[in-house]
Image (cartoon, rainbow, N blue to C red):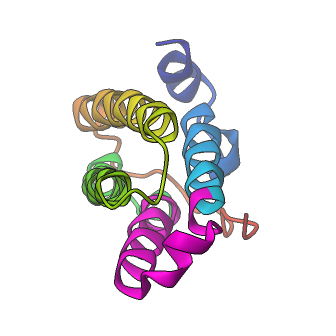
């Protein structure tokens, strides 16, 4: 993937410089649109769990990016990938409870599965490179 080569050649100094982070934000925004639906909002447990899982995807990336080694960053991305899987589970549950339409579910699941593949590839890349001193990065997330 082109973004892997870019990361290796021009080490990103901010998380926002990684194209995969933009994909995470797109997924997060799509889930947040689902969270605004009245029927989803009325199911407090589903709403809370889906919101936390979705938020955790990006939060783990932010925390991991600040680690000193690629291997440590990869470990946080594993948690991001797990949170993504949990978010997909809650989206499927929202569909089965008839809170969202099938096309909404299908789009989000397809996007989430593609994002999971991207995360998996990035994790493998980081573990293979295993740079020991990623340097000091400024706080990577501007809150979006």
Residue 110 seen in the figure: yes
Taking 141 as reference, is 122 left or right? left
Q: Position of residue 109 (x, y in %)?
A: 38, 37
Q: Position of residue 78 (x, y in %)?
A: 25, 52
| 87 in relation to 30, above or below | below
Q: Number of labelled discs?
A: 0
Query: Does 62 sit above or below residue 129?
Result: below
Reply above or below: 107 against 86. above
Say whether residue 60 is magenta: yes
Q: Main secondary structure of the magenta part?
A: helix
Q: Which residue occupies 37% across, 59% down?
A: 94
Q: Position of residue 77 (x, y in %)?
A: 34, 52
Q: Which quadrant of the figure contains the C terminus?
A: bottom right
Extreme residue toward the front, this view: 98
Give me the residue at 26% from left, 49% from top.
71
Near-viewer residue (115 or 88): 88
- Left or right relative to 111: residue 130: left
- Taking depth in this image into account, of 43 and 79 the one nearest to the observer is 43
Q: For this rendering, which residue is in front, 43 or 124?
A: 43
Image: 55 above or below 15: below
Residue 70 at x, y percent in the picture = 35, 47
Examine the structure image and report whether residue 58 is included in the region drawn in magenta: yes
What span is colored magenta in the figure? Answer: 34-63
Please name the residue shown 59% across and 21% down the image: 6
The quadrant in which residue 28 appears is bottom right
């Amino acid at each position: 993937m082109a973004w892997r080569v870019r990361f290796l050649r021009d080490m990103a100094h901010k998380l926002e410089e990684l194209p995969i982070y933009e994909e995470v934000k797109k997924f997060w925004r799509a889930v947040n649109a689902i969270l605004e639906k009245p029927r989803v909002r009325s199911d407090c447990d589903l709403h809370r769990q889906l919101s936390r899982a979705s938020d955790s995807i990006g939060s783990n990336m932010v925390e991991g990016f600040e680690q000193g080694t690629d291997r440590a960053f990869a470990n946080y991305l594993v948690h991001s990938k797990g949170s993504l899987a949990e978010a997909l589970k809650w989206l499927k549950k929202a569909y089965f409870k008839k809170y969202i339409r099938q096309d909404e579910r299908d789009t989000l699941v397809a996007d989430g599965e593609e994002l999971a593949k991207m995360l998996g590839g990035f994790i493998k890349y980081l573990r293979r490179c295993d740079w020991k001193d990623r340097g000091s990065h400024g706080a990577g997330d501007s809150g979006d």
